[in-house]
Image (cartoon, helix red, strand yellow):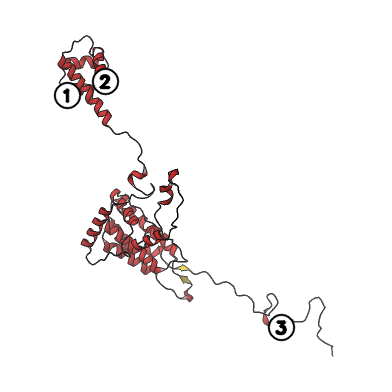
Amino acid sequence: MSLSDILKAEGLSEALIKVATDAGWTLSTFRHAADSPADLEKVIPDIFGSSELSRLQIAQVRAAWAGLSSSAASAPPAGPTSASETSSWVETFAPKITALKLTEYKKAFLSAYTSEILSPCTMPSLRLVSLAAHQESKKDYKWIPWKHRMSEEKAAELQLSRPTKQPRLEALGISSLLLDEPPTLEVGDSFMGVSAVQRILAIHDVALAMVGSCHLARLKAYSSKFMSLLSQRHEASSGLRAPTILEAQQADCKLWQGIYALVLEKDWQLNDAIFEYTEIRGDMSNLLQARARPPPPPRSNEKGIKGKGLGRFMSEHWKGHSLDGKGKGFGKDI
């Protein structure tokens, strides 16, 4: 919008508008010509030259200037928003959803899947639902690490296990950054088994289905095949072993990265992309295939047998004899 349009909208004649624009006045310079309406009347002769304006025309000019000034004052200042305005978590985390929104997700889930039961041990934690909802709203899908996939019950348990006494950091203004980090699971081979992986996948399935990303049946089909490949047992004589927990997590990460690549780059539907990687492509079988079992450590020599590389028979035969001519001899020659 130009200065001519602003003045014309207020009803000023085109002849006066042409005088102002020919003098070099623009929308920006007209807005900053005066700080108050009283100052504007002093500047009007400079804008319109020798032309004499009636009281009506002066009022029209003042109305145009007031409209520009009010629109500039009402515009919100551009600036970064703090993390506390959008979420009580640190800015790297997805914003928390409200309790009302969580209730809506629960009702929609139970209405769509009437045979499912949501209990504290099967209901995804607030953080997990918030992550899934944030990705669904932005259509910016990313693999959710296993450490964030926990139930409501597990999240409450980890929250209670935190130390009760916290340092007083309110005066420094950094308490929300240090003490408001959501709890996470510890993922490792030493304290997790196949059943724990099954619970992690099931919680993730419910979270994605609850926010409407994809159908629960398609997610369960993925998890079922994943667990069948992970839980395969191999005879010790075969020299093979199943993938470890960390190897399984890495496989899940690569699979979901491929699934989301189809959605974001090829415009696939998420249900179709999951079906592609579950039933058609062989990536899951390749990533979860059996690994070679490491060979057993070499066995040491039997206790009480000395000698390096001679064997038991040679050690017993040469016992008591010395190679340098000293020691017990063979006896008197006959």
- Which disc, if any, is residue 9? 1
In the depicted structure, whether residue 141 falls above or below residue 282: above
* Secondary element type, mark 3: helix
Looking at the figure, which quarter contains the C terminus? bottom right
On the rendered structure, is 309 left or right of 225? right
How far from the left and from the top, in percent, is residue 80?
A: 36, 38
Disc nearer the start of the sequence (2/1): 1
The percent coordinates of residue 99 (x first, y second) are: 28, 54
Three-letter amino acid code at the position of disc 1 = Ala
Residue placed furthest toward the bottom: 334
Q: Quadrant of the N terminus?
A: top left
Q: Say what amino acid the circle numbered 2 marks.
A: Ser
- Which circle marks residue 316 in the picture? 3
Disc 3 crowd, CA 10 A, few/some/many (<14, 14-19, 20+): few
Q: Position of residue 237 (x, y in %)?
A: 48, 76
Q: Disc 3 and disc 1: Cα gap in Å?
A: 118 Å
